[in-house]
């Protein structure tokens, strides 16, 4: 017999590190989701830039079923065909020649940061161990990744954190010049800061970061956990910056919700993660890799990537139309289907109010910090769902504006 569970159960049995909404979805199809009461929602959130092919994509469901009947897990004592095929595809599509598989974005970054230190250790000695990252960046929740991340609140109370990590402002090359030295082993950046407020890198800035890394023999690590796998309209966002990283991390959309992460790098750099230096029990398991292979096959096509720009335009048009009527956003920005709308000063700190009202209207949206409403829908969200989503969003915005006036 199935036990009855409700949102209240969460507070009784879960660690209180999340504050989930009252809605408990039970089913999804494409960009629509239903809760237990049968209420329907349009999904502009994509599980935080994860379900790039929507919910229950029929091809992915079939691949998963087929693989589930064949082989789930081996451990890295043996390799497997789906992992090898996926690695082949990822290296064919990118600057990289070598792949390390894991289960999440944080774990992919952990591997990248360890590799950067180990590579510098092997080639230049133990003194070259400093990592530079950017204020407001987000790289995960492990101790190393919260330390490299540029949001001090995520480190608070967890100190002592790993040493040798410095931060400067994103898109500010002078600050980076002042920090970088021959002791720097890596500069780590998101091509578009996600959790930090949907802030794209300037193309010129990215080029200069690359040059500075080359001058100081430091590796350039791109965290594409949120921006990768089609999210910005190219398979990885770095393709639009005209800059190649030395190491790239991917997760989120790579498995469309099935846990999988990857760290990509060149043959020379990969050599520093020699046998026994690093590992992950589940990393590269056949289930995850079979699904990720299908995700990559579907997303890296002109139909899907080409459709991202078109949908970007629809989102910007929808947000602009709402803004012309209600004057709630001071900036609408982003790349592809990673879009942010920053609220005006009179609503500062209140982005979450839009998310709460939107859910009541039957629409999932996200925030990125306290001031930015974020949209990261499926890359193949039907145009009709976008149109209906904006009808619901307008109702939510009207409610927030009315509440704000009444307050
Ligand atoms: C840019 C970036 N890096 C890393 C992570 C961490 O990924 P995960 O939660 O899968 O560990 C995230 C998650 O939001 C992210 O946006």
Image (cartoon, rainbow, N blue to C red):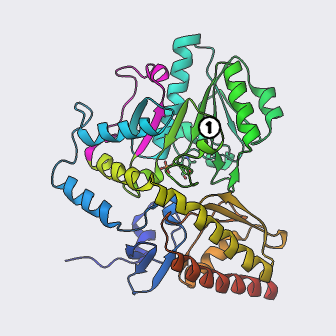
Check the image and report above or below for 100 versus 332.
Answer: above
Query: Closer to the camera, 13 or 343?
Result: 343
Look at 40% across and 34% down and name the residue there. 100
Left or right: 337, with 91 as reference point? right
Q: Position of residue 145 (x, y in %)?
A: 56, 40
Disc 1: which residue = 148
Look at 69% across and 19% down and name the residue there. 216
Left or right: 150, with 377 as reference point? right
Image quarter of the C terminus:
bottom right
Rendered image quadrant of residue 40: bottom left
Give, as a single range, the part of the protein colored magenta. Answer: 261-286
Q: Position of residue 50 (x, y in %)?
A: 47, 58
Look at 32% across and 46% down and name the residue there. 289
Look at 46% across and 36% down and name the residue there. 263
Using the rendered image of the protein, determine whether residue 158 is visible from the camera's viewpoint: no
Badge 1: few (under 14), some or many (20 or more) residues near its Cα, within 10 Å?
A: many
Residue 104 on the magenta segment? no
- Secondary element at tag 1: helix
């Amino acid at each position: 017999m199935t036990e009855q569970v409700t949102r209240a159960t969460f507070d009784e049995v879960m660690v209180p590190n999340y504050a989930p909404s009252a809605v408990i979805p039970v089913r999804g199809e494409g960009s629509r989701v239903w809760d237990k009461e049968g209420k329907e929602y349009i999904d502009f959130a994509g599980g935080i830039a994860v379900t790039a092919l929507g919910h229950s994509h029929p091809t992915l469901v079939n691949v998963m079923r087929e693989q589930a009947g064949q082989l789930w897990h081996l451990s890295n004592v043996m390799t497997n065909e789906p992992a090898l095929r996926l690695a082949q595809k990822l290296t064919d599509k990118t600057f990289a020649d070598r792949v390390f598989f894991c289960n999440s974005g944080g774990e992919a970054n952990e591997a990248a940061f360890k590799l950067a230190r180990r590579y510098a250790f092997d080639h230049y000695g133990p003194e070259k161990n400093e990592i530079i990252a950017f204020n407001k960046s987000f790289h995960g929740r492990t101790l190393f990744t919260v330390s490299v991340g540029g949001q001090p609140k995520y480190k608070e109370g967890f100190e002592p954190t790993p040493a040798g990590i410095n931060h400067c402002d994103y898109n500010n090359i002078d600050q980076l010049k002042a920090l970088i030295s021959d002791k720097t082993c890596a500069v780590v950046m998101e091509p578009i800061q996600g959790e930090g407020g949907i802030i794209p890198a300037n193309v010129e800035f990215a080029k200069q970061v690359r040059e500075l890394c080359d001058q100081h023999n430091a590796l350039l690590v791109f965290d594409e956990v949120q921006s990768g796998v089609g999210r910005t309209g190219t398979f990885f966002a770095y393709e639009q910056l005209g800059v190649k990283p030395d190491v790239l991390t991917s997760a989120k959309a790579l498995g469309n919700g099935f846990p999988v992460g990857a760290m990509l790098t060149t043959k020379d750099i990969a050599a520093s993660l020699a046998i026994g230096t690093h590992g992950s029990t589940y990393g590269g398991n056949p289930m995850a890799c079979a699904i990720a292979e299908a995700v990559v096959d579907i997303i890296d096509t002109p139909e899907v990537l080409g459709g991202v720009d078109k949908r970007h335009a629809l989102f910007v048009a929808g947000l602009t139309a709402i803004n012309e009527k209600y004057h709630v956003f001071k900036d609408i920005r982003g790349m592809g289907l990673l879009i942010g709308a920053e609220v005006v000063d009179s609503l500062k700190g209140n982005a979450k109010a839009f998310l709460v009202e939107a859910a009541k209207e039957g629409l999932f949206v996200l925030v990125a910090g306290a001031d930015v409403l974020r949209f990261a829908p499926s890359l193949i969200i039907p145009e009709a769902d976008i149109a209906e989503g904006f009808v619901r969003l307008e109702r939510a915005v009207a409610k927030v504006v009315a509440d704000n006036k009444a307050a």
